Structure formats: structure tokens, C-alpha cells
Amino acid sequence: MKPLKYLILCALILLICTCSGTKNLGTEDGFSFSKEERALIMQADSSVPMRVFKIDSKQDSLLLRTKSSPVHANPKDPVLQNFVNRLYRTVRDSVSLGVGIAAPQVGILKNIIWVQRFDKEEFPFEVYLNPKIISYSEQKQTFTEGCLSIPNRTETLNSRAYSIEITYDTMENKQHTETVEGFTAVIFQHEIDHLNGILYLDHLEKEIKDSN
């Protein structure tokens, strides 16, 4: 009986270790930056803005139409820290000044955005990892939108939800859910669209088709 119990115990330990190893492997491999992305991010420090991808370049346009993947919210990851800071420097740079930016707009296919919060005091910029919209209000709102990746063009959209409920991860690896309204909700919808390979022009085309 003792040898049998010993064998069973060893088998259980092996099973636990195998499952644990598989889980960790999936987390690290599925959520980390690719080799090319790491090289692009780390070619300069956090004070240097990144190049904004634009639809008038075929190669850029193809990437902008590609869906991004989740990122592991590891506050100790130097690549993530450097990228988040460089992405912020990009949206605040005089050449590419905006009210929001998404990682794909600088060539990084990860679910990361910066949004200016016009619904908070002093209109701060905040970073969001793995943001998702889980509900849209039926009430719509009309705003004129532009995009850093679509130069010299703005259009008025009537189909953005007035209120949205979002979930996201923070840089401290904590998950939050909140409701956002008004113009800030438009910014969130615009930037999260980028993470799914969608541009605001797609909404405009749908509005035109619907009106016809």
C-alpha cells in the first residue's frame, strides 16, 4: 500500500506542476511584446515620442487595420513602462498633439490607450490597459472627430453612444469598471476602435449608407 500511495502522490505533484507551468507559459507568451515590438519600443528612452502610423502609407494602413492583443499588466516590466511613457510623449508632442492615442497608432499591436479625461478636474491624461466596452447607451451624441492617423481631415459623426460602461486594467494590475459619458466617452470609443482595427471613417461610411 505504501508504494502505491507514494506513486499516487508523485503523480498528483507532477500533474499540479504541469498545469501550473502551462498556465504561466500562456500568460507570458500570449501577453508579452514581440521581439520586433520590444526593439521598436526600446530604441529610445521614455522622453522620445514615437512615429505615428498614417493611412496614407500602405504598410502603415495594413497595421492600423489589424486587431491588437491583450497585454500583461506587469508594473515591473521595463518594456511596458518605457512604452507607456513614450506613447504619452507622442500624444503630447506638438507634431502629433491629440486628446487620445492607441498603441497600434505607433506600430505596437497591444491593447493600450491614453485618454484625456475631460470629465475630471484639470482634464488629466490616463493610461488604460486591455480596455473593453461592455455596454453602450441607446442615446447617441454628435461630435466632430479627427485622428492622428488620418491627416488633415475631420468628420461629424452622429452614432457615438452618449454613455458607455468600460472595464480595464491599471498599470498596477488592478481591474476596474466604470461608466463614462459625454465627449470623454467619444474618445474612449474612438481609441478602443483602434485596438480592433477600426477607424472613425468606418462609422461615417455606415452612417452614409444608413441615411441612403
Image: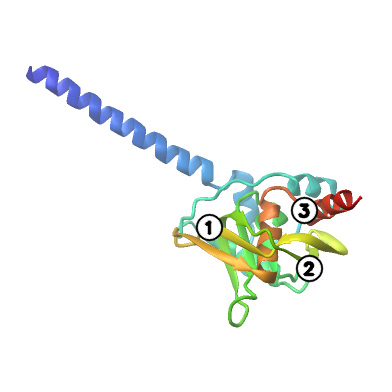
Disc 2 or 3, which lies upstream in sequence?
2
Question: Residue at the spot x=52%, y=45% of the render?
Answer: 31
Q: At which x and y percent is residue 166? A: 57, 59
* Residue farthest to the left, as pictured: 1
Query: Is disc 2 surrounded by few (<14), some (14 to 19) or many (20+) residues within 10 Å?
Result: some
Question: Which three-letter amino acid code belongs to the residue tagged 1?
Answer: Tyr
Residues at circles 2 and 3 in contact by the CB criterion of under 8 Å = no
Report the front residue among 200 and 44: 200
Seen in the image, is 59 located left or right of residue 42?
right
Report the front residue among 100 and 95: 100
Query: Is disc 3 surrounded by few (<14), some (14 to 19) or many (20+) residues within 10 Å?
Result: many
Question: Colour scheme of this structure image?
Answer: rainbow
Seen in the image, is 172 located left or right of residue 167?
left
Q: At which x and y percent is residue 86? A: 63, 64
| Measured Cα–Cα span from mark 2 to mark 3 | 15 Å
Question: Residue at the spot x=30%, y=33% of the render?
Answer: 17
Q: Which numbered circle lies on residue 168?
A: 1
Report the front residue among 173 and 205: 205
Report the front residue among 24 and 135: 135
Query: Relative to residue 77, is residue 181 depicted above or below?
Result: below
Q: Which numbered circle lies on residue 140?
A: none
Seen in the image, is 200 located left or right of residue 116?
right
Question: Which three-letter amino acid code belongs to the residue tagged 3?
Answer: Leu
Disc 1 or 2, which lies upstream in sequence?
2
Q: Secondary structure at mark 2?
A: strand
Q: Which residue is mark 2?
A: 143
